[in-house]
Image (cartoon, rainbow, N blue to C red):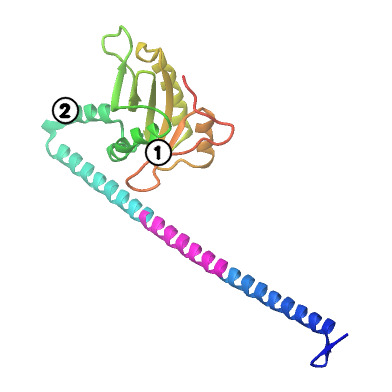
Amino acid sequence: MAEKNGMTRLEWAQAAAWKAIREGQKAAREFREETQKSLREFREETQKSLREYREESQKAARESREEMREIREYMRETSQKVWDSILVSRDNIDRLSKNLDAANKRSGKFDRKFGELWELMVVPHIREKFNELGFHFESVGRDLEFDRPNTNGRTLIEVDILLENGDSAIVVEVKDSFKKKYLDEHLVRMKKLKTLPRFANKKLYGAIAAEFVRGESKQHAFEQGFYVLNRPDSMNVEIEPFPKGCKPRAW
């Protein structure tokens, strides 16, 4: 074989091949290192964003809880002032008692409902949320009373929030916090409402709205076919998705 600079052509070709292999390996290492660096930066940026989101969410939750504590404290103080006034002015006891009874009948007792504040936060968003699931509700009613047929106005059942159209209706029970007895009461409410002519030919669905519905209580509601509404922040409402094996029940 001919020689070139003291090397045979074969040796020259082998040397060139090894050089190309080393350069390729170097390029591959650099590519892997650059890729790993980009992945590390992406993970760090993602983790940073998640931390900031959690911190903002926790801050909003703390502020919401503080607002609720202030509202409850204000209501306690107001209630105490009312009763102090009653004790001072004995002549007004009967009149004030009747007014309080009438107010309780219209809005429900505070220890059984989350109250006006929670309902007012739910109502502006609830129609939009259910319509996103395929319903077509145009209006929302709240604090409704339904009378027993042929009883001259005797109340059959009370409803916190009602969404209704020509084909279906959703009855929403609003609570401070969820308890199993509320679920049982709502089941009875649904059965009674279905006996009324107004709902006889409609699909009637039930929903529970509470500030906190978690764990076993939430599962019980889903198993009965109820929609579950939570409050993820101080000014919004969220419909929880049904878990696998559960679906909305139409009465």
Type of secondary structure dominating the magenta stretch: helix
Q: Position of residue 56 (x, y in %)?
A: 39, 58
Q: Position of residue 109 (x, y in %)?
A: 31, 33
Q: CA distance from mark 2 to mark 1?
A: 35 Å
Left or right: 73, with 197 as reference point: left
What is the tally of numbered marks visible in this picture? 2
Q: Residues within 10 Å of mark 2 (few under 14, many from 20)?
A: few
Q: Nearer the viewer, residue 228 or 158?
A: 228
Query: What span is in magenta?
Result: 38-60
Amino acid type, callout 2:
Asp
Q: Which mark is residue 94?
A: 2
**Residue at 26% over, 45% down:** 76
**Residue at 23% over, 47% down:** 77
Asked whether residue 244 is drawn in magenta, I would say: no
- Residue designated by label 1: 210
Label 2 sits on a secondary structure element that is helix
Q: Is 55 placed above or below 70 here?
A: below
Q: Nearer the viewer, residue 180 or 223?
A: 223
Q: Earlier in the sequence, mark 2 or mark 1?
A: 2
Amino acid type, callout 1:
Ala
Q: Residues within 10 Å of mark 1 (few under 14, many from 20)?
A: many
